[in-house]
Image: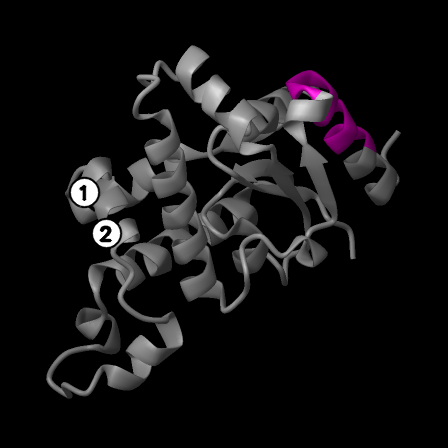
Amino acid sequence: MKKRIITIERQYGSGGSIIGKLAADKLGINCYNRQILEMTAQKCGISPEYLETAEENVPTSFLYSLLLSANPSRSIEDNLPLSDKVFLMESRIITDISNEEESFVLVGRCGNYILEEKGCFSVYIYANPEDRIERAIKEYGIAQNKAEQIMKKADKRRETFYNVNTGRLWQDKDQYALCLNSAELGDELCAELIVKAYRKYNGIE
């Protein structure tokens, strides 16, 4: 199966969002990242920040939530906690985009799981904690005394959201086609390697 869609999971401070945008620009395709959260928030009529809070408070697995939805007077989805509703709505938005666009880059949001049947080229971006903290301070403007705490919290939120909704382990590198250490390689080279591997895999010159 051709894998025209690139999905990127990334550790906080690894530069995955920047690398995803660089790769998309090199390929001349769209890159979706926080836009998915903003689209979901608009549909819900609430702020993106509130939805991010919901992602941080994932109470149970998606399938388990379905089993617990016992109120016959309401739909199954009505009974789900907000965190699961967020995942469902984001999944629909991502699926709709995949039906409209043959190729794009998707950063985060369990993309490799949601788009698995469509075929996607999955990438994992990581780096050592020291380099990620340094990036958070220099590029994200995070206070030095808060950078490590914010990094750990962000990683935990992403890991929990991914693990709960997919039944997989976020940091299990066996599930990704390409894993890159951005601290060792740099953002530009990471993007070039993604593009080269993507084109080679899909037979694109």
Q: Residue 32 at x, y = what percent?
A: 48, 34
Question: Quadrant location of the C terminus?
Answer: top right
Query: Which circle marks residue 27 in the picture?
Result: none
Quarter-wise, where is residue 46 in the image? top left
Q: Residue 62 at x, y = what percent?
A: 36, 71
Instruction: Give the mark count.
Output: 2
Vertical placement of residue 144 versus 200, above or below: above
Give the residues drawn in magenta, as a range.
186-196
- Distance between the Cα atoms at labels 2 and 1? 6 Å
Query: Which circle marks residue 54 in the picture?
Result: 2
> Does the magenta portion include 41?
no
Q: Residue furthest left?
A: 73
Vertical placement of residue 94 versus 149, above or below: below
Q: Are marks 2 and 1 in contact (CB under 8 Å)?
A: yes
Q: Residue 117 at x, y = what percent?
A: 63, 63
Badge 2, how many Cα within 10 Å: few under 14, some, many 20+? some
Q: Residue 18 at x, y = what percent?
A: 54, 22
Vertical placement of residue 91 versus 133, above or below: below
- In the image: residue 193, left or right of residue 135: right
Quarter-wise, where is residue 65 in the image? bottom left
Colour scheme of the rendered structure: one colour
Which residue is the site of mark 1? 50
Badge 1, how many Cα within 10 Å: few under 14, some, many 20+? few
Vertical placement of residue 133 versus 198, above or below: above
Q: Is label 2 in a helix, a strand or a loop?
A: helix
- For the point 48% across and 18% down, the residue is 134
- In the image: residue 183, left or right of residue 197: left
